[in-house]
Image (tube, rainbow, N blue to C red):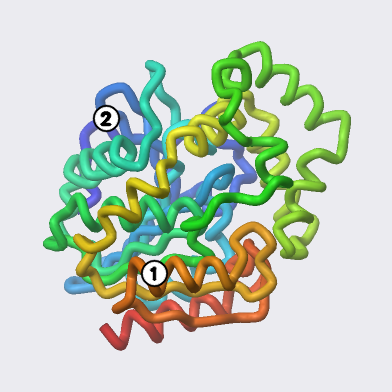
């Protein structure tokens, strides 16, 4: 498991030398993609495996304060989604949930991973985790946890930066270059992070600002949001039989708790809900608490 001939450690141009857990980073060449993944594995047999999927605009760094606790109990794979973080691609690809889940399946197959004990997705990463579980025909994923899952439309404040309704203009190279310039000269990203209802520390903000200064990250976030069809995903929810738990923040201004609970009740009636005090990025502001909840859910599977 995790062996691949086209896997190598990144150079400083591919992943910054000060990136969290960079020593666990690997660049993995698969078809048109050079994936950035972080692998945490202990040399013990029969350890469970968790796959962690970030949301729109995120990257592997969003999990870094949860790694130590989770890795005590399981091997971990963290992945930068297409267009995000330090994953690279050589062609203009489709970023629909179905397409990205197929790409993830291909990556996992290349890594010789046949079973995932728990897939954990945050925000739009939770929607992707649902799609991946359905696409795997419920054979390879034992449990699923969605943290503040983006199963309701995003708020106006988020749309102002990343909304795809004008995607032919927004996704252009010129636009993202201008936006990249603006992020350096204005508090745009600071305001976006504040709008999540989560009070990140200075280092956490620094990491987000660093990835948002990349044109490709901005464009990837816009494309991912543009391609996410929640109505189609929810129409397939009856096919999801994976043991599912949603961990939601009651003060999340991006994914409002009451509309979300209604969507969950309608489309995932057999799932469990854990409610916390916290905003959209509560897994970053309360990493030990969320990690403990994840492990409790896993142990109850």
Q: Which residue is at 41% across, 42% downward? A: 229
Within-10-Å neighbours for mark 2: few <14, some 14–19, many 20+: some
| Residue at (54% x, 38% y) in the render | 85
Residue 167: percent from left, percent from top: 56, 23
The percent coordinates of residue 185 (x first, y second) are 87, 29
| Residue 72 placement (x, y as % from top left) | 41, 76
Quarter of the image where the C terminus is located: bottom left
**140 vs 15: above or below:** below
**Image position of 233 (left or right of 126):** left
Q: Quadrant of residue 211?
A: top right
- Disc tally is 2
Residue at 29% across, 78% down: 270
Q: Give the residue pinned by disc 1.
A: 145
Q: Position of residue 179 (x, y in %)?
A: 73, 24
Left or right placement of residue 68 versus residue 72 in this view: right
Residue 225 in the image: above or below residue 301: above
Residue at (63%, 36%) from the top-left corner?
A: 162
Numbered disc 1: secondary structure: strand
Determine crowd level at label 1: few under 14, some 14-19, many 20+ residues with C-alpha closer than 10 A: many
**Mark 2, residue position:** 30
Indicate the secondary structure of the residue bearing disc 2: strand
Kindly report the distance in space between the C-alpha atoms of the residues bearing marks 2 and 1. Answer: 27 Å
């Amino acid at each position: 498991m995790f062996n691949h001939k086209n896997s190598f450690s990144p150079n400083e141009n591919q992943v910054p030398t000060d990136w969290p857990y960079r020593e666990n980073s690997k660049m993995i060449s698969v078809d048109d993609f050079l994936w950035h993944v972080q692998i945490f594995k202990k040399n013990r047999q029969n350890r469970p495996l968790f796959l962690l999927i970030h949301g729109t605009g995120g990257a592997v760094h969003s999990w870094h304060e949860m790694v130590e606790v989770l890795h005590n109990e399981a091997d971990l794979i963290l992945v930068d989604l297409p267009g995000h973080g330090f994953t690279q691609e050589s062609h203009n690809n489709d970023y629909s949930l179905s397409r990205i889940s197929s790409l993830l399946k291909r990556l996992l197959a290349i890594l010789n991973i046949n079973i995932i004990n728990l897939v954990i997705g945050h925000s739009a990463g939770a929607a992707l985790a649902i799609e991946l579980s359905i696409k795997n025909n419920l054979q390879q994923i034992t449990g699923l946890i969605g943290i503040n899952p983006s199963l309701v439309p995003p708020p106006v404040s988020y749309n102002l930066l990343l909304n795809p309704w004008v995607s032919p203009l927004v996704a252009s190279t010129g636009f993202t270059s201008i936006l990249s310039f603006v992020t350096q000269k204005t508090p745009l990203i600071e305001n976006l992070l504040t709008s999540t209802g989560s009070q990140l520390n200075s280092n956490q903000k620094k990491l987000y600002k660093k990835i948002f200064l990349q044109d490709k990250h901005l464009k990837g976030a816009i494309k991912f949001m543009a391609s996410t069809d929640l109505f189609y995903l929810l129409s397939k929810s009856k096919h999801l039989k994976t043991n599912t738990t949603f961990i939601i923040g009651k003060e999340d201004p991006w994914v409002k708790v009451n509309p979300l609970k209604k969507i969950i009740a309608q489309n995932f009636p057999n799932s469990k809900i854990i409610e916390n005090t916290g905003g959209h990025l509560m897994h970053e502001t309360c990493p030990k608490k969320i990690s403990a909840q994840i492990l409790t859910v896993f142990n109850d599977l």
